[in-house]
Image (cartoon, rainbow, N blue to C red):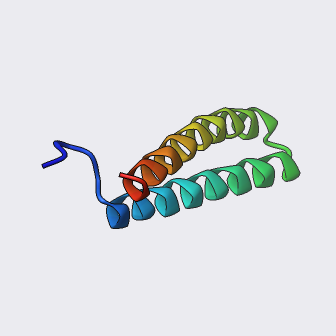
Amino acid sequence: MDGDRPGAGTALAQVIVAVLAWWLVTLAGDAMYAIGLWPIGAILRILAILFLGGAVLAFFQLVGALFR
């Protein structure tokens, strides 16, 4: 047993969900900037950076699951 480490399928699903979340939040932030609601857009861009960090961590979990 590998403890609580995800398998390759679970890790791939986590990468896909994290990247989609990052993309949607970035798109929403850009839309807020476009319609003039820049404070909300700025908050969403900061949130997008956090989601990008989560996507990078999920990617490294995927790599670890593939080469285990």
Residue 9: x and y in percent read: 35, 67
| Among the 4 quarters of the image, the one containing residue 20 | bottom right
Q: Please tell me which residue lies in front, 6 or 20.
A: 6
Nearer-the-camera pick, 57 or 1: 1
Report the front residue among 26 and 3: 3
**From the viewer's perspective, is 60 left or right of 29?**
left
Number of numbered tags placed on the structure image: 0
Q: Return the residue found at the far left.
A: 1
Please report the residue visible at 42 percent of the width from the left and 54 percent of the height from the top: 67
Quarter of the image for residue 53 reads: top right
Query: In the displayed structure, would residue 67 be above or below residue 40?
Result: below
In x, y percent, where is residue 39? 75, 32
Q: Nearer the viewer, residue 25 or 19?
A: 19
Q: Residue at x 33, y 61 (%)?
A: 10
Q: Residue at x 49, y 57 (%)?
A: 15
Q: Is residue 15 left or right of residue 52?
A: left
Furthest toward the front, the residue is 67
Question: Which residue lies at the image location 26% right of the left edge and 46% below the top edge?
Answer: 5
- Relative to residue 23, is residue 7 drawn left or right? left
